[in-house]
Image (cartoon, rainbow, N blue to C red):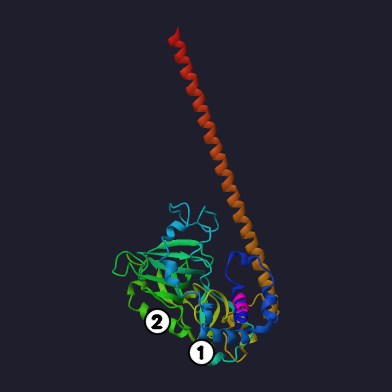
């Protein structure tokens, strides 16, 4: 049994959200080919739920200590230099593109939903996701910091969340949230909850986490407006059951967000019993709206605008995923190369500056010696 658990753990960690993962290829094959003794997505879901229920050896519950991560130290010292540097997208800033070991591999990520689960209408929820930056939000010690899914620091500001600003009695408390950020509207769309007001929530099931996030946020009205305590609008993404009725209700409406800003990116599907775990999991699925008829059935009503978003040359989901993974892998390989080139460039600049400083020092010393020699000669005369 222990051997089985070890194999499952390796399968779960195989697609973790790390920068190295972006360099891997063959994700498409792993999704569409048999997963060995754990079978297809359906079989892996059932196996995961069984182990999650028993929580054997605590191997798939990796976040009981989420608050220990936050409180493990002053995370401002995880980045060097210690001086704050304004974040500039796509430009390397020394120290701030380094992966923060504390918040790397924390977000729960989805697999492509390649088959309709047997218990889909009974045990699954759907969440419409806007186009935006996926971020881990940590409010603690009177400020709120935002990190990418790889643990990169993005920016920092005050929010009305517990621990998110220095102006209320909750400033010493802590929250950890999963969200999408839309820069154009300065809005944070909450997707999930890892900890709230010093209470870890990752052991809770999907249904409970969303309920708790929704009810608790109502007690913090400052999050709805821009004010001294809150510098970003905070909204909760809707979650509804995966029945044909609710899916048709959701997808027959266009746009999903006011003035189509931000536009709908896709749909996340959560198993109602899923705990919050790191990396990709078959208990969370992802689909673009135009894939719905192919995977979930053609009896779901979809607004024509979503169908019109079908990419040119689209054949089917399997073909799309294969091309997507190749494109994504190349993109991240180029990104890694660019960052390495920037780092090398910074090293060269640092070396050049050091050499110049040494040369200046040597010239100063030579000039000082010449002056002393002239003085000694004058005294002798």
Instruction: Let me know if residue 185 appears in the view.
Output: no
Q: Report the mark closest to the observer, 2 or 1.
A: 2
Between the residue at mark 2 and the residue at mark 1, the CA separation in whole angstroms equals 22 Å
The range drawn in magenta is 6-10
Q: Which residue is mark 1?
A: 246
Q: Is residue 101 above or below residue 193?
A: above
Q: Residue at x 57, y 86 (%)?
A: 302
Q: Which residue is mark 2?
A: 212
How far from the left and from the top, in percent, is residue 226?
Answer: 36, 68
| Nearer to me, 328 or 281 | 281
Q: Is residue 278 above or below residue 354?
A: below
- Quadrant where the C terminus sits is top left
Q: Is residue 333 above or below residue 11?
A: above
Q: Residue at x 43, y 54 (%)?
A: 84
Instruction: Tell me the crowding category of disc 1: few under 14, some 14 to 19, or many 20 or more residues within 10 angstroms, Cα based.
Output: some
Q: Residue at x 62, y 87 (%)?
A: 43
């Amino acid at each position: 049994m222990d051997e089985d658990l070890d194999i499952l753990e390796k399968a779960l960690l195989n697609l973790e959200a790390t920068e190295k993962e972006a360099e891997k290829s063959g994700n498409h094959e792993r999704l569409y080919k048999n997963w060995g003794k754990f079978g297809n997505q359906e079989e892996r879901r059932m196996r995961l739920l069984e182990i999650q229920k028993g929580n054997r050896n605590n191997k798939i519950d990796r976040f009981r200590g989420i608050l220990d991560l936050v409180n493990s130290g002053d995370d401002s010292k995880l980045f060097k230099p210690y001086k704050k540097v304004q974040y500039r997208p796509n430009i390397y800033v020394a120290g701030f593109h380094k992966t923060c070991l504390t918040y790397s591999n924390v977000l729960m990520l989805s697999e492509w939903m390649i088959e309709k689960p047997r218990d889909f209408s009974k045990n699954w929820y759907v969440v419409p996701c806007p186009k935006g930056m996926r971020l881990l939000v940590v409010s603690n010690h009177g400020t709120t910091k935002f990190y990418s899914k790889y643990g990169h620091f993005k920016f920092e500001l005050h929010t009305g969340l517990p621990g998110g600003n220095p102006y209320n009695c909750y400033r010493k408390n802590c929250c950890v949230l999963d969200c999408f950020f839309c820069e154009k509207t300065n809005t944070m769309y909450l997707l999930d909850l890892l900890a709230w007001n010093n209470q870890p929530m990752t052991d809770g099931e999907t249904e409970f986490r969303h309920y708790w996030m929704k009810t608790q946020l109502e007690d913090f009205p400052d999050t709805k407006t821009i004010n001294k305590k809150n510098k970003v609008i905070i909204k909760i993404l809707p979650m509804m059951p995966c029945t044909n009725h609710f899916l048709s209700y959701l997808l027959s409406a266009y746009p999903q967000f006011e003035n189509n800003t931000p536009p709908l990116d896709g749909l996340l599907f959560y198993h109602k019993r899923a705990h919050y775990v790191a990396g990709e999991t078959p208990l969370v699925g992802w689909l673009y709206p135009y894939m719905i008829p192919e995977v979930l059935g053609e009896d779901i009503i979809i607004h024509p605008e979503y169908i019109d978003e079908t990419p040119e040359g689209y054949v089917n989901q399997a073909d799309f995923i294969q091309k997507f993974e190749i494109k994504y892998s190349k993109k991240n390989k180029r990104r890694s190369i660019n960052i390495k080139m920037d780092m090398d460039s910074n090293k060269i600049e640092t070396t050049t500056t050091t050499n110049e400083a040494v040369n200046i020092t040597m010239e100063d010393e030579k000039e000082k010696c010449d002056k002393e020699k002239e003085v000694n000669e004058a005294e002798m005369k």
